Image (cartoon, helix red, strand yellow):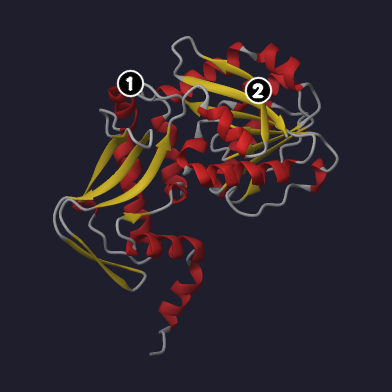
Amino acid sequence: MLLTDQAAAFATSIDPAFRQDILEGLSRSPKATPPIWFYDRKGSELFEQITDLPEYYPTRTETALLKAHGSDFATAIGEGRAVVEFGAGSARKTPHLLRAIAPAAYVPIDISGDFLHASSAELASAFPGLPVLPVVGDFNGPLDLPSAIEGLPRLGFFPGSTIGNMEPDAAVDLLRAMRALLGQDATLLIGMDRIKDRDRLIAAYDDAAGVTAAFNLNLVERINRELEGDLPVDGFAHRAIWNDRKARIEMHLEAVAPLHFHVAGQCFHMEAGETIHTESSHKYGARDGSLLLSAGGWDPVQEWIDAEGLFALILATAA
């Protein structure tokens, strides 16, 4: 059957990686989709709202560590590095690090182009003498860094415990890819969320105001908008679950009734109570983070932890 002109235009306008990941994820049993597709512009804005919620401790805890230990970072990292931030988002925490270490350049990487360029312009205004060189892309895939930082020693910055969104084997692969991308003399400053009380963890991913629920459900809206989906947004409920065996919080979209829907011309069915697993957030014990970094080609050299032991910033050097 020949596509109509309208259908052909639609087929060429969608992101093929988004289409493939969603169709494959909905075809699995159990259903699961990669968390990277949360972050269209609305999703990125909703996540920034999440970071300000009283229940969501990681952002304020990590920010406090960055503020408190600037002199430590300056001593351990030194000046004149190109800072490459993976998944930069709004880069709200980044100025604390940049002020401490006086870098030669800043390269923020993010998949949401509009959001990245807006935050990069704001940061460039705050640091007028600093070259800000944004790269739109998925840090889980191949990347090319700007030629302007060629020859500069590099510091990878991976805050927010984003590493926890990945399965451990994928996290090791990513750390190895970062090691290859950043080069022989590179260092890495990475945030890792610690294992803690179950109720505190669940509250951080299922806030009373419902912002995290809106963030999760925005994926349904994006599928409908970009992949010609007809998923009923009110047919899903947000669920946050602590998986103790795997030491992770899981976010799911649960069908509240039997559902039949279409995405990019394909048909799907879900029973009531069936879920789409949309995100995992792994938590790491005191030794787990060092083991993960070592497996990924990095030697941990220093660690900063808040007084409650909620969150850690770890500095590592390329092995």
Q: Quadrant of the C terminus?
A: top right
In the image, 42 versus 253, the foreground residue is 253
**Few, some or many C-alpha atoms within 10 Å of disc 2 (few <14, some 14-19, many ≥20)?**
many
Q: Quadrant of residue 151?
A: top right
Question: In the image, what residue type sits under mark 1?
Answer: Asp
Q: Earlier in the sequence, mark 1 or mark 2?
A: 2
Furthest residue in direction bottom, as rendered:
1
State the SS at label 2: helix
Image quarter (top left, top right, bottom left or bottom right) of the N terminus: bottom left
Rendering quarter of residue 220: bottom left
Residue 88 placement (x, y as % from top left): 58, 37
Q: Is residue 248 left or right of residue 305?
A: left
Instruction: Give the residue type that dot 2 points to.
Output: Leu
Neighbor class of circle 1 (other Cα within 10 Å; few <14, some 14-19, many 20+) is few
Q: CA distance from mark 1 to mark 2?
A: 29 Å
Percent of width and height locating residue 212: 33, 36
- Residue 91 seen: no
What residue is shown with label 2?
97
In the image, residue 305 lies at what x, y percent? 53, 15
Give the residue number, with chain letter if any, for mark 1.
197
Mark toward the viewer: 1 or 2: 1
Question: Which residue is farthest right?
Answer: 151
User: SS class of the residue under badge 1?
Assistant: loop
